[in-house]
Image (cartoon, rainbow, N blue to C red):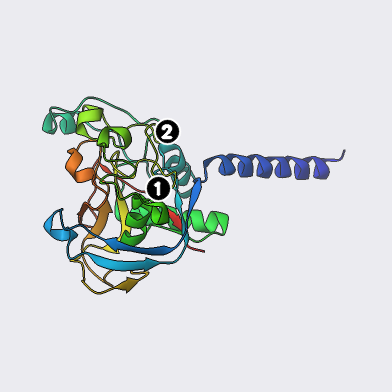
Amino acid sequence: MNITVKITTSILMLMLLLNFSYAQTEPTMVFVKGGTFIMGSEKGDYDEVPVHKVTLKSYYISKYEVTVLQYREFCAETGVKMPLVPTPEWYQEHDEAKKWTWRETNPISYVKWNEADAYCKWLSKSTGKNYSLPTEAQWEFAARGGVKSKNFTYSGSENPNEVCWYDETTYERGPMPVGRLKPNELGIYDMSGNVWEWCLDYYAKYKSSSQKDPKGPTKGVYRVVRGGSWYYVGKMCRLTSRDGPRIAYTNYNYGFRVVINP
């Protein structure tokens, strides 16, 4: 075998190894059949009303929140810095929190909206698939269980302890490995609790009119997060609960999952 053949063979083997490694960390996706649902809740907070009818096309959503392992690969390939684990100063400000560190199966957290969006764009370019953050309507429809919904308060159960990592089940020890608790009706995990999940939409008051594939306002200074987190009370993990932090803000409660729009 001459030197040119050896070099070519080595390059091909390296490419195969890289592709194999990537295939291991691409998000596992769940098909969400399109349908119509009533979004919001008349029993929730002020920003969960007015309830309104929403119709969505079919799409795919990730079975789990994006993990530390998956986000670390993005950082390695793009030069983006990994978020730092909590500092001693953070623990002084959150004196009830227990010390924790990154584990590869944990959901990534301390991610800003722009960083979550950049991950989706990188993943789209890497795979040729149309990845993005879910719209708020896509997020809630999937959290409800889509067309298989049983109208639970939390994503997959009336009992938060079955499906939700929140302050009373984590004892404020940090985010937990994904997929440990019961999935919802579509087989999706951790849509209640663990980390708040960034959505595509700007945060705004709901409209009462029926909507089809809504994407929210065209401009704003806040983005939607949904689902509650490991450091929050169970009430915040209800599948209709919502919040709207500034785009450039983050903390150790904020992560995300992704969708594919066919």
> Of discs 2 and 1, which sits in the foreground?
2
Q: Which mark, by number, is residue 105?
A: 2
Whether residue 68 is visible to the viewer of this picture, yes or no, is yes
- Identified by mark 1, the residue type is Val
- Secondary structure of the residue carrying tag 1 is loop
Which of the 4 quarters of the picture holds residue 91?
top left
Question: Residue 237 or 160: which is nearer the viewer?
Answer: 160
Q: Residue at x 24, y 48 (%)?
A: 250
Against 97, residue 220 (above or below) is below
Q: Position of residue 19 (x, y in %)?
A: 62, 44
Q: Residues within 10 Å of mark 1 (few under 14, many from 20)?
A: some
The span from disc 2 to disc 1 (Cα, nearest Å) is 20 Å
Q: Position of residue 61 (x, y in %)?
A: 44, 53
Q: Position of residue 207 (x, y in %)?
A: 21, 71
- Identified by mark 2, the residue type is Thr
Q: Residue furthest right?
A: 1
Residue hosting label 1: 80
Task: Answer left or right for 208 relative to 189.
Answer: left
Task: Answer left or right for 184 relative to 7.
Answer: left
Question: Residue 86 or 55: which is nearer the viewer?
Answer: 55
Which of the 4 quarters of the picture holds residue 81?
top left
Whether residue 215 is visible to the viewer of this picture, yes or no, is no
Q: Residues within 10 Å of mark 2 (few under 14, many from 20)?
A: some
Q: Position of residue 68 (x, y in %)?
A: 40, 38
Task: Answer left or right for 32 relative to 55.
Answer: right
Which of the 4 quarters of the picture holds residue 128?
bottom right
Quarter of the picture holding the N terminus: top right
